[in-house]
């Protein structure tokens, strides 16, 4: 993994703590705001707080009708401040689109707005339906005495129960894979015509992470276009991966051979686009949710029916091949992190993942057997298997993951007989200058951290 920037992380933590204090103090105004927005005539009452990876929420109940809703705000420090409004708008558009075009259980949006419309100017917000159910991630994970332990799929889980859950998720993924768009980016609905279109560049999970925590220049993304071809999108991603390496000042924390290995990996990644990044190059492109995983889903523990899919903030129309991948979360572990921890951890991950891969593909085959499909459309189950067998799964994952791209490249995409030979002479000639530049940046980072009194606490 990329060495952390503790200054950026501390800045983010300070911003989060300040917002949380203000949010808690504003609780009465927030409840009153929800009451007014929904016309509840002062029947609204506070139920509880929720804190997620990117959002802070309050559940509010109508004391007369017992109706419940959630009002949710993106947290500064978790979401790059200038993108909080964009994040909210994009999620509202995706939820609205899914409710119109799929049977996927997503919450109804009652109201949303930007900072200037919010109580005490707390920030952009969404008021949405309160969805019932238990967290699916908690249902699937192995029980441990320590809640802080990393989640992993329970090896003793009832196989019939898991198969049923996989079939439901396969059905959702099949629906998503059939939503077609001519361009790559964020969707919106024209207020007059009611037509849906890709109108803005994408806002992704990885973009938020590198800008918030790695020193990546946010202005680079303001000039990002809407893409017509997958290959152009991947070329832009390859450039972003190289910019990330240049602008993260902690890279030289590692030994020089590791630092140079990152440089080689990111430049070689660009060379792999003709091999891995040309599936349905000209479209149609598909809606893809980068954060669609069990911890963002709810399930009825009695019937094992999935009752809600949540958190679509970083959902965009993306290269179609993303929608043809297996779910990365099949054993509840992040593959990028697992393979970055060494050969033993990598093999252990694969040993656990492979059987679940087969189980999920078989679940998809059963769903497809019950579903009609457009004439000439390949089976999604076959596409998933091909993506895994060809290594495209790992190329796609690397393209979305600036932190772990280097390890993914060296573990799964590197060809032993090529290596640095894939790079041109001019690129290779810059080795010493690159290493020196990263060393200078790292020393400046250490000096800044040493002078920061917050780290004396």
Image: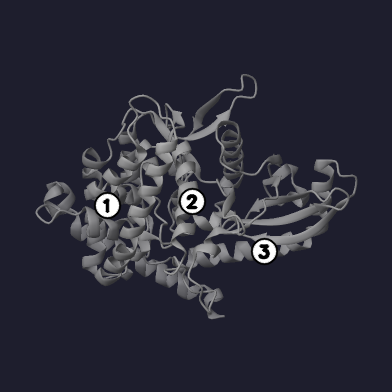
Quarter of the figure that contains the N terminus: bottom left
In front here: 379 or 341? 379
Measured Cα–Cα span from mark 3 to mark 1: 37 Å
Q: Position of residue 140 (x, y in %)?
A: 50, 63
The residue lying toward the viewer, choosing from 148 and 12, is 148
Foreground: 295 or 42?
A: 295
Few, some or many C-alpha atoms within 10 Å of disc 1 (few <14, some 14-19, many ≥20)? many
Whether pointer 2 and pointer 1 mark residues with C-beta atoms closer than 8 Å, the reply is no
Q: Residue at x 67, y 41 (%)?
A: 108
Q: Quadrant of residue 302?
A: bottom right
Where does residue 333 sit, x and y in percent of width and height? Answer: 41, 63
Residue of label 2: 291
Q: Which comes before the other along the chain, label 2 or label 3?
A: 3
- Mark 3 sits on what residue? 18
The quarter in which the C terminus is drawn is: bottom right
Find the distance from the CA under tag 2 to the CA under tag 1. Answer: 24 Å
Q: Secondary structure at mark 3?
A: helix
At 60% across and 31% down in the image, what residue appears? 100
């Amino acid at each position: 993994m990329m060495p952390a920037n503790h200054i950026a992380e501390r800045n983010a933590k300070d911003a989060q703590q300040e917002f949380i204090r203000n949010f808690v103090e504003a609780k009465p105004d927030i409840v009153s705001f929800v009451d007014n927005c929904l016309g509840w005539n002062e029947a609204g009452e506070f139920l509880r707080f929720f804190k997620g990876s990117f959002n802070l929420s309050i559940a509010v109940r109508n004391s007369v009708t017992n109706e419940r809703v959630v009002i949710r705000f993106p947290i500064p420090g978790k979401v790059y401040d200038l993108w909080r409004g964009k994040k909210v708008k994009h999620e509202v558009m995706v939820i609205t689109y899914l409710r119109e075009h799929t049977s996927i259980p997503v919450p109804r949006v009652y109201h949303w707005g930007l900072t200037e419309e919010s109580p005490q100017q707390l920030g952009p917000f969404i008021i949405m339906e309160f969805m019932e159910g238990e967290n699916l991630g908690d249902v699937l994970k192995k029980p441990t005495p320590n809640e802080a332990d990393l989640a992993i799929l329970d090896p003793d889980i009832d196989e019939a129960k898991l198969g049923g859950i996989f079939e439901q998720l396969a059905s959702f993924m099949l629906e998503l894979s059939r939503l077609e768009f001519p361009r790559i980016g964020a969707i919106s609905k024209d207020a007059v015509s009611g037509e849906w279109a890709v109108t803005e560049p994408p806002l992704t999970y990885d973009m938020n992470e590198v800008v918030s925590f790695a020193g990546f220049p946010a202005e680079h993304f303001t000039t990002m276009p809407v893409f017509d071809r997958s290959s152009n999108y991947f070329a832009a991603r390859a450039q972003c991966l190289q910019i990330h390496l240049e602008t993260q000042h902690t890279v030289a924390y590692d030994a020089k051979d590791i630092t140079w290995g990152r440089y080689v990996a990111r430049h070689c990644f660009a060379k792999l686009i003709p091999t891995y990044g040309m599936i349905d190059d000209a479209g149609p492109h598909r809606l893809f949710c980068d954060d669609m995983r069990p911890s963002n889903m709810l399930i009825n523990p009695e019937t094992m029916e999935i009752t809600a899919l949540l958190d679509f903030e970083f959902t965009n129309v993306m290269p179609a091949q993303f929608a043809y991948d297996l779910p990365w979360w099949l054993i509840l572990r992040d593959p990028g992190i697992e393979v970055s921890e060494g050969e033993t951890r990598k093999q252990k991950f694969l040993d656990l993942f492979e059987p679940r891969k087969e189980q999920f593909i078989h679940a998809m085959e059963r769903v497809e057997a019950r579903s009609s499909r457009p004439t000439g459309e390949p089976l999604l189950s076959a596409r998933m298997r091909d993506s895994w067998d060809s290594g495209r799964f790992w190329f796609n994952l690397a393209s979305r993951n600036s932190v772990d791209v280097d390890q993914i490249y060296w573990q799964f995409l590197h060809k032993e007989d090529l290596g640095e030979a894939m790079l041109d002479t001019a690129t290779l000639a810059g080795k010493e200058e690159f290493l020196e530049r990263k060393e200078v940046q790292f020393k400046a980072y250490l000096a800044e951290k040493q002078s920061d009194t917050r780290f004396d606490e």
